[in-house]
Every structure is written in C-alpha cells, then in structure tokens.
Image (cartoon, rainbow, N blue to C red):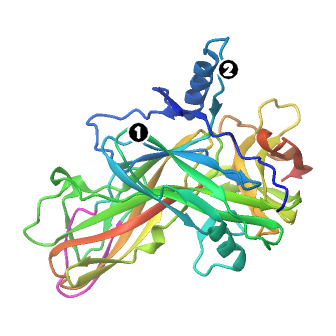
Amino acid sequence: MPNYTFHARPIFAAVALAATSIAAPAPVHANDLLVAPTRIVLNGSRGTEVILNNIGTEEATYRISLELRRMTADGNLEEVEIPNEIEEAAVEMIRYAPRRVVLPPNQPQAIRIGVRAPDALPDGEYRAHMLFRAIPRPRPVAEEEPQPTQGFNIRLTPIYGVSIPIIVRHGELAATAAISDARIVRDNDRRAISFSLSRQGEQSTYGEVIITKPGIDIPIVRARGIAVYPELTQRTVTLPVNEAFEGSLSGPVLIQYREIESDGGRLLAEARTELR
Amino acid sequence: MTKLFKTAALSATAALALGANAAHAADATATATAQILEQITVTRTSHLNFGTIVPDTAASGNVTVAATSAGTRTCDANLTCAGAASVSSAAFDVTASAGSTVSVTGLTGLTQLTSGTDTMAVSLAGSTLDLSLGSDTLYVGGDLTVGANQPTGTYTGNFTVSVNY
C-alpha cells in the first residue's frame, strides 16, 4: 500500500449561511442550494465530507453525481463527452454517499467522500467534479400563465446546481507555474488585465492572483480560485480591475500567483512587468 | 455534529466573519473547533419567459429575450408578440467568497422545445458571472425560432445550469 497522508480539511465545520435579502413578494424558492467547501483535495484513502444545504423555502430532492469537466485554454470548464483513461479512473476510485437526498428547508446533509485507489494506480492527479442539483418539481399553478386564445406558451424548467472539484493526488507530485504576456484588455465593458499562466509538472496549481502597482496599497486586481489543471500546460487568465481604482493601468505592475494558506501559502509565480 | 450558524448578513464575507466570532465565543475551558468552509449558494429568482407569441402564416421568425436584468424581448416583424408584462430572463443569484472564479456550463444542451409531437428550435445564452464582490446574478436569455403556422400549445423544455467551481 502506498503511504498516504491526509490533507483534506477536517470534517466538522461551521458553515456560515449568507441569507440573501429578497424583495417582496417573496418568491417560492424551490431547489435552491448551498454547498461547502468549494474544492476538495484527497491525498490518501481517508475521506472527508461536503455539506449540502437546502436554502429554499420548500422541500427538495437533490441528486449528487460525479461529472467530468475539462479546462479550456481561456480557463473555462467544459463538459466532457468522451472521457479519457485518467478521467475514467477518477470516477471509479471516488466513493461517495448518499447519492440522493430529500431535504426540508434549512436542513443540511453531509455527503461522505472517500477514495479507493486500485493497487497498480500510476502516480498522478485524478479529478472529477461533484455535481449537486435538485430534481425539478412541477411548477405550482400560481406560476402558470393563462392559456392564450391564440399563439402558444413556452415553459422552460431550469435544472440548476453547483459542481466542485474532487481532486485525488496519488504519489509524490509537484508543479511549477510561470506568468507571461501581461496586457490591458476590456472584458464585458470593464477594464481588465490578461496574462498567460503556464504550468509544468504532474499536478494542478491553484491559488490567488494579486496584481499591485508600486505606490498603491490596495491591489488593482485580486482573484481567488485560479487553477491550471493538469490537462493544460498554459491558459489565459483575464481578470477585471477593481472598480475603485480609477488611475491609469499602464506602467509597472507586480503580478503574484500564490497558493491558498491551507495548501502551504507558497508563492507559485511572480512577474514584474510593464503594462501598456 | 455539524453546526450551522445562520446569519442575516448580506454578503458572504460578512457571514463568514460572523461565523468565526460565534466559534470564538465558545466556553474557554472546552475544546471548541470550528472551521469556516468556503461556500457557494445558488438561488433562482425568476423564470425565463418569452410571453405570448402568435406565429406568422407565411414565414418563420425569431423571438429573443436578452440575458440581462431587463430581459428585453425582441420580436421579428412578422410575428405578433403579446403579454409583455410577463416577459423576463431567468435569474440565478450566486454567492461565494469575494473574488471567486466560477464557470457556467449546461446552457447549450437545450436545442428544442416540444408540445406533444410539435417542436420548436431554441438556443439559450447566459450573462457573465463576476464574483469579485462575492455575489452576482446569472441572467439566462434565449432565442426561439418560430415556424410558419407553428401549432398552438404549451411548449416545454428542461435546461441545465451548472455553476462550476
């Protein structure tokens, strides 16, 4: 058996609930959900838990499934149609239960997650995405539109949910990152900074990006959860500039890519560059 | 047991801070451990609704609802569009830690609506989610292709929206 160490977060958790204020009239909130934490890394055979909470106003039935997602060169995730060997192995080794739960409003449920790695598993990082979503219920009569005397009605039912990555690391893995090609762009009518983030090694990199200008205390860009998954050696990162910063973007900047504290807080990559 | 601290805080950041205080307030002689987990919530606040559409007898036409807060409807000239008051884009409030990065998938899966044996082509699109302040609304709009003499009825379809961390 490989010598496993356990790096996933402890199970017992206080989850703070952010209640959204809702303008009157209060809508019926069926199928709404909260999921915590938002990323899981398993370094061994011991498991962990994810909390699913029904934050709607009605009882809902949730289904929990393992899905596959791949990162594209612009950092978006896309659904996988034909899984490769690594993805198939990930789905096979990640065990979880329950897979279907009925929850009354404000009732949390822990989903237990574990790994059973096959004996001859090659070293590497294996990843699947755990999808939580409610099974839609027929819409109540009050929400139905009156049948028109001519023409037609459209009724679209959303099936919505959240997915979080479940990452299994097997063996001694490492990765390095580098930043290049930083430039000023516009993204959805906002000022943004774009750069290339390259990755080398057997595992993903994950962390926070902070961009500062000399002499200005507050970062002009701060973004968490920036990942480069192993299927990529390079991706583009485009991040909106803090709207509170009204000065010129051109000139020298410091771009830092840093691991989150629970992963060690290491500086993954740093670049001093001139924006124009 | 897992304990949930329910707060009325408006932002995820404020809620997390409150949770941390509650944990520290535990009896000093007891061993109290509480880890604040990063969380994500998704709440649907409106449905995608195209209103009432009367097809043309001669040619097909398109009706779009914009993936914006207003959900503005655009109707080809040969179609008659009514029921403007009920027109809306679908809206999903997403909250997470400030500065989080998420990616939305699933919207392109729906291409056709059905009413019995009748069908109608549809494509959906979503707005961009910016969670730099911790919360944002994902708006979903769509484009319907209404055939000439499209039969009356109620056309239904399911679409999926996955907010991927």
Q: Residue at x 29, y 80 (%)?
A: B120
Residue B92 percent across, percent down from the top left: 43, 50
Residue A106 percent across, percent down from the top left: 40, 37
Q: Residue furthest top?
A: B28
- Residue A252 visible? The answer is no
Q: Residue furthest bottom?
A: B58
Q: Residue furthest left?
A: A149
Instruction: Check the residue under mark 2 and report the chain it is in.
Output: B
Instruction: Check the residue under mark 1 and report the chain it is in.
Output: A
**Nearer to us in this view, A35 or A171:** A171
* Mark 2, residue position: B31
> Where's the C terminus of chain B, which quadrant?
bottom right
Q: Say above or below: B109 vs A37.
A: below
* Residue interval drawn in magenta: B50-64
Asked if the magenta segment contains residue A196, the reply would be no
Quarter residue B61 falls in:
bottom left
The label shown at residue A107 is 1
Q: Say above or below: B90 vs B156.
A: above
**Nearer to us in this view, B32 or B12:** B32
From mark 2 to mark 1, how far is it between C-alphas? 26 Å
Residue A225 percent across, percent down from the top left: 70, 49
Asked which secondary structure carries label 2, the reply is: loop
Under mark 2, the amino acid is: Thr
Q: Residue furthest front?
A: A1
Mark 2: few/some/many CA within 10 Å (<14, 14-19, 20+)? few
